Image (tube, rainbow, N blue to C red):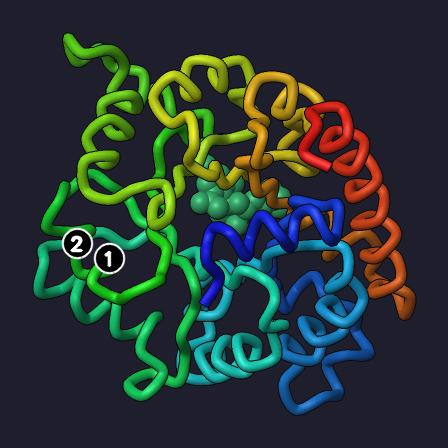
Amino acid sequence: MISRARLIEQIKQKKSFLCVGLDTDIDKIPEFLKDYPDPILEFNKRIIDATKDLCVAYKPNAAFYEAYGIKGLQSLINTWKYLPSECLNIIDAKRGDIGNTSDKYARAFFDEKASGMSFDAITITPYMGNDSVTPYLAYEGKWVILLALTSSVGSKDFQYLQTGDGYLYETVIKKANTWAGADRIMYVVGATKSTEFTNIRKFAPDNFLLVPGVGAQGGSLEDVCRYGITKDCGLIVNASRSIIYASNGMDFAEAARTEAQNIQQQMQAELEKAGVI
Ligand SMILES: O=C(O)c1cc(=O)[nH]c(=O)n1[C@@H]1O[C@H](COP(=O)(O)O)[C@@H](O)[C@H]1O
């Protein structure tokens, strides 16, 4: 279980707020790994070994595992077992359904006895409202990470609609803040939306923001920090493809480390600039 205080302590200790995204694609991993009984797991283990001192979180994306049925789920369970206990382990599942269905999703990702996995945090779509989110919050100490303003081009379709109370994404944040505090809820805000961070901080001054979209999607870490960093850091910045596929040769883990190290060094400078460390 990773509390807010423990997360902040890790960030200060590692001088990093990097999340390594485990969007592991069998078609993109090095050929030689395909001789192993579980190539996806083997890939993940080597990426984790190469990056665990440089990041504070890992985020396996459920789609990349579910695509392979039972075998994929086994890879996900064994990846979860291998994740370092000091890191925040996020399952990027983007679920959202009526309460009794959410109950089962929560069990699938939070209840080790039932499913073999117990992640610290899960990404959730907020569209179905309070009763779709509370089943996850019923698990003491677990985090819910709600999509607020996504990195996608399609974010403009709904998230920027005016509700009479500001943009729809603002309403999501204001409403969800009444469900639980900054010790249980984080929001996803895409790095590609860095100028909106000033606005978001008005409604979520203390919440951690999970920020995907640096690297392959072109978001700027510097801009995210300029507008979004807080005295506790308040940011977890994810990079998936730019780290895990930095090379597709024998040196893939080493290349991933070099890429993670580059980001960590930039993060250290930002943490110093903001007075977090
Ligand atoms: O919830 C997410 O993590 C997420 C939200 C969002 O707005 N944009 C976004 O890219 N993501 C996820 O973040 C990761 C980004 O991967 P890369 O673009 O390869 O770094 C993927 O797993 C996406 O599913």
Kindly tell me whether residue 20 is visible in this rendering: no
Q: In the image as oriented, which residue stretches furthest toward the bottom? A: 37
Residue drawn at (25%, 34%) of the image:
177
Image vertical order of residue 180 relative to residue 169, above or below: below
**Gap between marks 1 and 2, in whole Å?**
5 Å
Kindly tell me whether residue 161 is visible in this rendering: yes
Residue 137 circle label: 1
Q: How crowded is mark 2: few (under 14 residues within 10 Å), some or many (20 or more)?
A: some
Q: How crowded is mark 1: few (under 14 residues within 10 Å), some or many (20 or more)?
A: some
> Which of the 4 image quadrants contains residue 109?
bottom left
Image vertical order of residue 55 relative to residue 193, above or below: below
Instruction: Tell me which amino acid carries mark 1.
Output: Leu
Picture mark count: 2
Q: Is 126 left, or right, of 240 in this rendering?
A: left
Instruction: Tell me which amino acid carries mark 2.
Output: Thr
Labels 1 & 2 near each other (Cβ < 8 A): yes
Across and down, in percent, residue 189 comes to 46, 31
Name the element at disc 2. Answer: helix
Residue drawn at (18%, 35%) of the image:
178
Across and down, in percent, residue 188 comes to 43, 37
Q: Is 186 left, or right, of 236 in this rendering?
A: left
Where, quadrant-wise, is the N terminus in this rendering? Answer: bottom left
In the picture of the structure, the residue carrying the numbered disc 2 is 134
Where, quadrant-wise, is the C terminus in this rendering? Answer: top right
Residue drawn at (58%, 72%) of the image:
85
Across and down, in percent, residue 156 comes to 36, 19
Residue situated in front as seen by the camera: 242 or 30: 242
Residue situated in front as seen by the camera: 172 or 139: 139
Residue situated in front as seen by the camera: 102 or 232: 232
Residue drawn at (72%, 46%) of the image:
16
